[in-house]
Structures are given as structure tokens and as C-alpha cells.
Amino acid sequence: MIAQICERFGIGGRVREAALAAYDRSAALEYPAQRHAHLNVLEAFLAEGIAESDLAGTTGYGYDDAARERYEAVLARVLGAQRALARLSIVSGTHAIVAALAACTPPSRTLLSISGAPYDTLRNAICAAPYSLVSQGVKYAEVALGADGGIDLGAVEQALADPTVASVFIQRSRGYAPRRALSVAECERAYRLVKEKAPEVVVLVDNCYGELVEEREPLPAGADLIMGSLIKNLGGSIAPAGAYVAGGSELVERVAARLFAPGLGAALGPTLGFGRSFFQGLFLAPSIVEATLRGLDFFAALFEGLGYRVDPVCGAKRADIVLAIGLGSAERLGRFAAGLQSALPVNARFRPEPGTVPGYADPVLMSSGAFVGGATIELSCDAPLRAPYEVYVQGGVSLAHACLGALFAARALEISG
């Protein structure tokens, strides 16, 4: 396949040779967690007995919306939750996370982040923006990640001595930060510590980019609530919008009351005819996630072969669908983004330019040509213009397209010197 791509698109020299070696290195990799995820999803659909009539939706208030109710039941099974709240009206992962944090952290109580500073937009919503949680009386504290990039359990134990702590937050994925993603296994040790030292504290996990990547999700490992987007992993590149909160029934109801209205909770919410897309996207999600991981391993092998620092390296155990590539300068970020953009199925003829993104202090450079706007399960990249000048590659619904994007980005770097 690599030789055919290179021949058709005129890619030669050092990039072609590195690509052939990268494909040899990555093509034989196995993805057992995705086989497990396939079986989990199949089992969930069969256990819930989804029928054709469950695919239809409602308008207006959404009373008795079968698509909503049945989809949330299937999703809860897939995620190991007592209950899931998955709605078009929850517009992003950040929306879901902030709603859950607010619902579980009363004013004058403390929200404790134990995975360091959250990604820019979320930290802004917690403690900087007008109407932030802190401005409404919530206290906020952080525990930095340890020297190995993992959760510093000793520091967490000390922080839990504060009797005002009501909720603990963990961000699994790296965000736009030079840190690694956190695996379910290492987060599990933190959950145990929290429950041992402060059993009443609610553990909330940002699961964005991590769904179906590992054999276990955070809830069976001990988390209380997880939150994420439906246009990333779980949407299978088909779901048109939405986000979710999943976990214990009482906590999910608490979030629903915060999002909608006390007394109404989760009883309302039309699917507007998109139920079929949600179901089909979830059914395909394990295959899409596997294709994404295969593509990212090729990206990693190629750019490591060209002399760039990548994290994680090809073949490493992954906890999310994000690859960091250290490019070292704003100029290289621009070349990379332009090269990748030229391989995307939508807007390939445009050149990305740095711009202001709500919630981010630095300009952000993005390559995006998705069929669903913002669906980073489709091939894309983001790069804040700040040291250490890393680009974060996400998604890729087919291996061939990921390889093409990687080659176009690499060629853009090589051509420009």
C-alpha cells in the first residue's frame, strides 16, 4: 500500500524509504483490546434486544423517546455503567465535564484535580472565565503529575487530608500538553486511594479520546462518573453531535438535574431522528478505534524514523487516540499542518492558519477536514503555538487515509527543509 501511495502521489526520496520501513514495523501489530471491545459492543446490542422501532426519534420535548432511552441503555452496558446520559443537547465533552463537576462539587467545597492542570478550555471554565465554578463558590486545587508522568499518589494522599474535598478529577488524555495519557490501570490505583482515605469523595474521569482503547473502561476499575464526547471514539465517525455522562444512577441523575431542571432530570430530550446514527456509530466504534490506532502507529514509526520525537512510540500500549510529535518550532508546525490538511477529504485546498480558540491563551493551529465538524475521530491535528511546539495528531477512520496524511505531512516538512 505504501509503495502505491508514493507512486500515485509522487512521494519519493527519504520520506518514501522511511515510510516503507515504518509500514513494515507497524503492519504486524496486534490490537487485542479492540477485539475485546468488539465483543463488548456486540454483547450490549444483543442483551438490550435493539429493534427497528428503537431507531426512530422524537421532536419537541422528547417524551418517551425510544432511541434516546435504548441508546443510553446500550451505552451504559458498553461503559460498565449503571446508567448513561447521552444527549445531542450536551454539545461537547467539556460541557459534559463541567456539568458533572458542578453537580458533584457544592459551593465552599473543593474540586481536586490529581492529574495536574486540566486542558486549557476546562481549566478556564473551572477557575478563570466569567461564571466559572470558582466564581460560584467552588474551591479548586491541583496535584501535579509525578516525575514519571503518572499520578503522584503520595501527594494525592496529602491533598485528601483537606476535609473540604468533595470531588476528585482525573484527565486521562494529554490535552494540548507535553504529558502522556493515563492508563486505566494506573488510574485505578488512584481510585482505590481516594476511596480508602475519603470514601465520600466522588471520583470523576475525563474519558475523552480513551473510550474502547483499552480492555477496561474507568467505571469497572472504580471511578464514579466518566464524561466524554459522542463525536470522538464512541461516535464511530457517524454520530452528528453530543456528549455523555455515565456512572452510578444517583450521580447521573444529579448531573441531569444540573443540566436540565430539577424534577425533570433526564426525562426529556429529543433525538430528532438521529438515533440511527448514534446506534450505528457505536456499533462501528471498535473498528474505527482500531483503524485509528493502526494509523497512529504508522505515524509514530514514520516520524520517529525521520528523526522526530514521538509519544507514544510505535507499538507502545496506548490509553487514548492522540499522538504527540515534537517538531521544535512554530515554522515546522505550520508545514506539518499544511501538509496534513492537503490530504483531508474536506477543505484540502485550504491552508491552516493560527487562530484564536475560545479558552486557549495561545493561538492554535488546526488541520481539520471532517464530515462531522470537530469529530477528532476523523484524521486531524492541533498545535498550540507554544513551546515545546508539539503537534497532536488524532483519529483516522481508515489506515490508508492515515498513511496518506502522514506522508503528506512528512513531505511538507522535507520539501521545506
Image (spheres, rainbow, N blue to C red):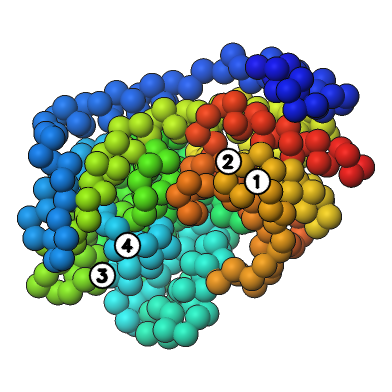
Per the image, the residue denoted by label 3 is 259
Image x and y of residue 63, in percent: 8, 60
Q: 385 and 225: which one is in front?
A: 385
- Residue type at mark 3 is Leu
For label 2, count other residues whose C-alpha is less than 10 Å away and answer few (under 14), some (14-19) or many (20+): some
In the image: residue 267, left or right of residue 209 = left
What secondary structure is marked by label 1? loop
Residue 81 visible to an observer of this rendering: no
Please tell me which of labels 3 and 2 falls first in the chain: 3
- Residue type at mark 2 is Pro
Image x and y of residue 152, in percent: 54, 53
| Mark seen at residue 348 | 1
| Mark seen at residue 90 | 4
- Residue type at mark 1 is Ala
Per the image, the residue denoted by label 2 is 345
Report the residue at 88% width, 39% height from top: 415
